[in-house]
Amino acid sequence: MSQLLWQKSSFSEGGADTCVEVAASPSGTRHLRESDAPATVMATSAAALRGLVRSLKDGTVMRMP
């Protein structure tokens, strides 16, 4: 996975070392990680990631208290 090109979230604060990063593999799989824990990577499909982001924006994802 070292060949992946990681991109920081556009919502990251400038200079902050804790943010979400995303990368796409040649097969189309999307990979997510926290910048402060780069060895822990979650993989998902592009469609599932789009659905999650859409749900977060709509406020339809249940958030833990």
Image: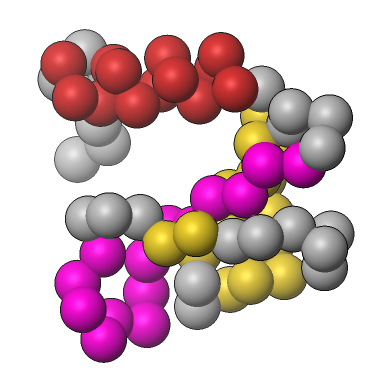
| 23 w.r.t. 36: above or below | above
Question: Going 27% across and 55% down the picture, which residue do you hit?
Answer: 10
Q: Say which quadrant the C terminus sits in.
A: top left
Front residue (pair 28, 61)? 28
| 7 w.r.t. 54: above or below | below
- Magenta region: which residues? 12-25
| 60 w.r.t. 30: above or below | above
| 38 w.r.t. 54: above or below | below
Residue 25 in the image, given as x and y percentages of width and height: 77, 42
Which SS does the magenta portion mostly show? Answer: loop
Q: Say which quadrant the N terminus sits in.
A: bottom right
Question: Going 82% across and 37% down the picture, which residue do you hit?
Answer: 26
Task: Count the numbered circles shown.
Answer: 0
Q: How is the image coloured?
A: secondary structure
Residue 62 in the image, given as x and y percentages of width and height: 26, 21
Residue 16 in the image, given as x and y percentages of width and height: 28, 81
